[in-house]
Amino acid sequence: MIDVAAFFSKLKETLTKTRNNFVSKVTELVTVHKKIDEEFYEELEDILLQADVGVAAACHLLDEIRSEVKQRKISEAADVRDLLEEKMLELLGEQASLEINTALPAVILVVGVNGVGKTTTIGKLAYRMCQQGKDVLLVAADTFRAAAIEQLEIWSERTGSEIIKHMAGSDPAAVVFDALQAAKKRGIDVVIIDTAGRLHTKTNLMEELRKIERVVTREIPEAPHEVLLVIDAATGQNALRQAELFKEATKVTGIALAKLDGTAKGGIVLAISEELGIPVKLVGTGEGMEDLRDFDSHEFVSALFTEEDE
C-alpha cells in the first residue's frame, strides 16, 4: 500500500529547487505588488520563463489570468497566486497513466538521447513491474553503445528481470525480434525495449527506430503499447526540441521526466503539455529504484505551491 503522505513529502522535496525558483518568486511578486497592472504581468511572465515554462505556455497562462481577473473583477495581486495555481492545473489536465494492454506480452518501447537517464528509468520501471508480480524482459536494443548493454545487464540483475542481448554492433531490430519470440514462448508479462540515443539529429538513427517499431508491430500487431520518451528535466527547452525529433520518427505516447529532483526548471512540465500535447506519465524523483512515480497533475501542482512548513 502506497503511503500517500510520504509520497507527497517526497514530491515536495523533489520540487524544492523549482519551488524556490518559481513559486517563491510569485509569492514575493504578489506581496510587493498590491495592484494588478502591466508591470505586474511583465514580472510574472519573466518568472514563468525563468522556470522554463516556455513562451507558449507562459502566454497561455497569462492570457487566461488576464481574462479571469477581468471576469471575476479581481483587484488584489495576492489573489493571482491561487489563480495561477488553478490555471496551471487546467493546462496540465488529468492524469494519464501507462497503457499496458492485458494481452501478453505488453511492449514498452523506450526512446531518448544519451545521457538523459533512459537506462536508469528503464531499470526503475522494471523494478516497479517486478514488485507488482509481473515477469519482465529487458531488451538491449541499444547495440551501438557497449556500455548500454552492460548497464542494462546490471539492472536485470538488480531487479530480477530477464534480458535478451546480442553482441555490441548487432542489428537492433534483430535483437527485438529475438526478444519478442522469447517473450511469447516464456509467457512474459512486460517487455521493455531500450533503444539507441546517440546522434538523435541523424536520419539513420531515427530510421532505426522506425524499423524497430515495424518489427514490434509485425510480431505483436497491437504493440508497442507504449512509446515512452525519456527527457532530462534539467535540459529545459532543449528537451522540447528532442521530443519534436522523436515524434517525427515514432508515435510517442508519453513522457518519462527524469532528474526532476535536480533541477529548478520543473516548469518544463507545462511547456511539454502546451507545445507537444504529449502527456507526462512518469517522473523520476530521486536515485533509488523506487523513485519513479506516475505523474499526477494535482499532486504536482499542490506540491509546487505548498509552503515548506505545511
Image: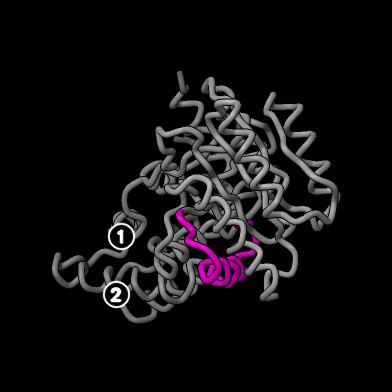
Q: Quadrant of residue 20?
A: bottom right
Q: Which one is in front, 27 or 272?
A: 272
Q: Quadrant of the C terminus?
A: top left
Please say if 23 is above or below 307.
Answer: below
Prevailing secondary structure of the magenta residues: helix
Badge 2 is on which residue? Answer: 63
What label does residue 9 carry, if any?
none
Residue 191 falls in image quadrant: top right
- For mark 1, does the 10 Å Cα neighbourhood hold few (<14), some (14 to 19), or many (20 or more) residues? some
Judging from the image, what secondary structure is the residue with disc 1 in?
Answer: helix
Is 268 on the left-hand or right-hand side of 146?
Answer: left
131 displayed left or right of 161? left
Residue 280, image x, y percentages: 46, 52
Residue 221 can be seen, yes or no: yes
Q: What is the three-letter code of the residue carrying label 2?
A: Asp
Which residue is painted at 39% across and 47% down in the image?
297
Which stretch is magenta? 231-253
Mark 1 lies on residue: 87
Element type where label 2 sits in the image = helix
Residue 107: image x %, image y %?
53, 42
244 is within the stretch colored magenta: yes
Q: Position of residue 294 (x, y in %)?
A: 47, 39
Instruction: Give the residue drawn at x 29%, y 57%.
Output: 90
Label 2: how many Cα within 10 Å (few below 14, some 14–19, many 20+): few
Q: CA distance from mark 2 to mark 1?
A: 10 Å
| Disc 1 residue type (three-letter) | Lys
- Give the answer, above or below, for where 63 lies relative to 291: below
- Is residue 224 covered in magenta? no
Please state which of residues 28 and 8 is positioned toward the viewer in this rendering. Answer: 8
Q: Is residue 50 visible?
A: no
Q: Earlier in the sequence, mark 2 or mark 1?
A: 2
